[in-house]
Image (tube, coloured by chain):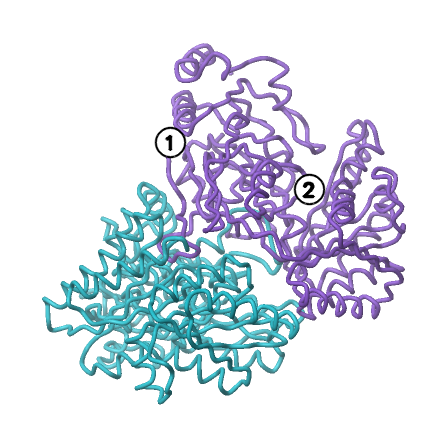
Chain colours: A purple, B cyan
Amino acid sequence: MEAASVNLINDLKQILSESQVTENQTVRELHARDESYHAVSLPDIVVFPETAQQVSEVVKLANKYKIPMVPFGLGSSLEGHVIPYNHGITIDFSLMNKILEVRENDFLVKVQPGVTRSQLNKELKKYGLFFSVDPGADATLGGMAATNASGTTSVKYGVMRDQVRDLEVVLADGSIIHTGNLAAKSSSGYHLNGLFVGSEGTLGCFTELTLRVYGIPEHVMAARASFPTLNHAVEAVVSILQSGVPIARVELVDEPSMKQVNLYSDTSYNEAATLFLEFHGNEAGLKHDVEFTKEIVAEHNCYDIEFETDNAARNRLWEARHNLAYAYIHGNPGKKLMVTDVCLPISELSGAIHHAREAVDLLGLTGGIVGHVGDGNYHVLLMIDNNNQEEIKRAEQLNEQIVLYALERKGTCTGEHGVGVGKQKYQEKEHGNSLFVMEKIKLALDPDNLLNPNKILMLERV
Amino acid sequence: MEAASVNLINDLKQILSESQVTENQTVRELHARDESYHAVSLPDIVVFPETAQQVSEVVKLANKYKIPMVPFGLGSSLEGHVIPYNHGITIDFSLMNKILEVRENDFLVKVQPGVTRSQLNKELKKYGLFFSVDPGADATLGGMAATNASGTTSVKYGVMRDQVRDLEVVLADGSIIHTGNLAAKSSSGYHLNGLFVGSEGTLGCFTELTLRVYGIPEHVMAARASFPTLNHAVEAVVSILQSGVPIARVELVDEPSMKQVNLYSDTSYNEAATLFLEFHGNEAGLKHDVEFTKEIVAEHNCYDIEFETDNAARNRLWEARHNLAYAYIHGNPGKKLMVTDVCLPISELSGAIHHAREAVDLLGLTGGIVGHVGDGNYHVLLMIDNNNQEEIKRAEQLNEQIVLYALERKGTCTGEHGVGVGKQKYQEKEHGNSLFVMEKIKLALDPDNLLNPNKILMLERV
């Protein structure tokens, strides 16, 4: 950014206070990265709006100067979504972090985009409610909507897109729209909620979200089941799903990852292919589900199953699971995380994980396999040395092999992390000529390609 | 259609067989209406394609001659969706009625758009599976996707949009795309599945659908609960939902409608405000849910609750509920059906139904109130004399009052029937300036406004 910059800064300071606009190097560096291995790139300016109106005015100014913008939550994305490769303005939503309304009788909440998932759940607990989407990281809800995040509970409660009833969005021209309403269903007009969720900041900035929440279940039971091989564990999940048991969570953690868990979380779980399970329901129904599940896992050679009914033990279990990525990061100082993220039809999952395990070994990489296997979604966690080009190359080769395997079986290159820049090269292969439809929509709504340019779609224009 | 017609017909007969293209008056008349009171309008030509390729070629021809097109399933729409007010070509999908694949282990089916819901369920039964969306009418699945249909089971299983994993779509330019994949979730690219579902034929013609299906539940129990007033029944539903009981169906039928049910279905149910309920689950859990529900309805003055556990009695119950619209039609020969269709946040439902009941009486209309009340969606069923302009006017006035009441409370003008032409006048009020976003998308994908023109959106161009 050259000539425009002084004028733009001055204009920004007309609409925002001095402290809401910065060119400070440290602040810019904090907005130059996400939690992934993707290369850093600095924004020119970081702004901290407090209202939708301010966001709208920032966007109008960016339009005036034709400067790109990147909306930014907490930077916990994993595919470079928030890294401003075209520089320009990063719009940081951390000051818009208020829970605006809890409509407990409607099972709805209205929040600003900078509210984090744990902040929301802390508030909801007072009402006997909880927000279901649980991607591990304590991301902002705006960011989670932008990437259509999901996680451990999606097998029962659905993904982020299923929870969004309405978004307030600032469009590329600065106008402010609402994408939905508060009714549980609607057949009125095009489904803009669904379109904007997962648009990764390329179609608009979210300034308010109305989300579905749930009653805390009457009874919860969690379990850890150990298997002799990864394949046995995966096959057990397929059988559980096919049995119709309404499972709330079912997570796979492989043997190397269980070792990391024990090291990092100070637990002494079996170091074997493990399923972390959770059941929600009434006591009588749950007992039946648990018994049925025990029979199913036994048929798949499960040699140890431990149940955790009390809150503390259950929380410890899920905390250990959630800390896994950090356990890897912690255990590999100086290295960066690369995570694959394919999702396949459930009947293809066992073959896919087997293929991934072999590919990791063949490429001489070390990595763990974990996954939200109830959805057919699994991750290979790799710790890579960002200074070792050859290692990066092998890791990317692995990612590519895993993605191609999934796409050939009608899966997707990203189950929950999103496209960002990391999955761009697979978009054409995955979407074919429906990519043209996406491009037409993007250009219809953001003709100058100013909103998070060249994320998801690589357009010629900028 | 004048000069172009002979050439167009000749061109159509180059790509379709003689019997797949018709100008026959009777066939055109069958495609000039739907099941509603909306005025009829004839297409010029009706075509019956057998493949996506044929649909694509028809669309390309329509483009060449700039002739509008309307995709047509069975004509069971309720807001004039399939009525070709701009004439042109109606594309009838009745020959594309094959179930292409049942992936039982993935809980997925692939069907052509002309397959009906009952046809699919008959096939799925062999696999112990069922398709959940149940709008009453035995509509085609293509049509149900086009309007984002829902119905009695949506409170548990979701609406049509929730079931669509992939669509094959012929776009306005004749190109063929796929909108999704077979994975249970994806964060890859814009969510085209969600955009195309509910687009009412204005963005493309569906030529193949991949849909989610479910295992037939282990145990099912149905019940009928009678209440002294409509309000007691509605309040009971709100309490059931808030209790967290995972109810599979909860339908409200008012006293006048119960009378119609008994008359038409030869039943002798209590003629009172009634809830039809259904529970799905394992035996132990279900028993607990039913007991809990009994307590809740008792608190709301339910004076009679009858359970139906055997299949035959349960089917009779739901058949009676489903036949209600036909019961009204049958009981009012010569009159046409007008149905309101608002959906509100659940906390507003009781007030809304109370308001509707008063409005019906004040306007001197006769009509029944029924609804998928678990979703906050209810209908007033009115039988109107299409030759009586004054009666039509009063019915439209009622519809307007009901819609405005819902919109003021952040509901929607249509919960499940769609916009068609009937709900067009409320689009601006409901969507505000997000209507411009919809228009931009429509024009980006169908610049000549040839696909079901002037449904949902009223565009200047045609």
> Can you tell which quarter of the image residue A82 is in?
top right
At horizontal 83% and vertical 57% (from top left) the residue drawn is A306
Please name the amino acid that badge 2 sits on: Gly
Gap in angstroms between the C-alphas marked 2 and 1: 34 Å
Label 1 sits on a secondary structure element that is loop
Residue A250: % across, % down: 72, 56
Which residue is identified by label 2?
A136
Residue B256: % across, % down: 28, 76
Q: Residue A173 carries which label?
A: 1
- Of residues B172 and B130, the one nearer the viewer is B130
| Callout 2: chain | A
- Of residues B408 and B187, the one nearer the viewer is B408
Residue B257 visible to the viewer: yes
Q: Are marks 2 and 1 on the same chain?
A: yes
Residue A441: % across, % down: 43, 44
Label 2 sits on a secondary structure element that is loop
Q: Is residue A130 above or below residue B6?
A: above
- Of residues B308 and A45, the one nearer the viewer is B308
Q: Is residue B116 above or below residue A184?
A: below
Which quadrant: the N terminus of chain B? bottom left
Please name the amino acid that badge 1 sits on: Asp
Residue B315: % across, % down: 48, 83
User: In this rendering, would A430 be left or right of A136?
Assistant: left
At horizontal 68% and vertical 63% (from top left) the residue drawn is A283
Q: Is residue B266 above or below residue B97?
A: below
Q: Which mark is residue A248?
A: none
At horizontal 81% and vertical 30% (from top left) the residue drawn is A388
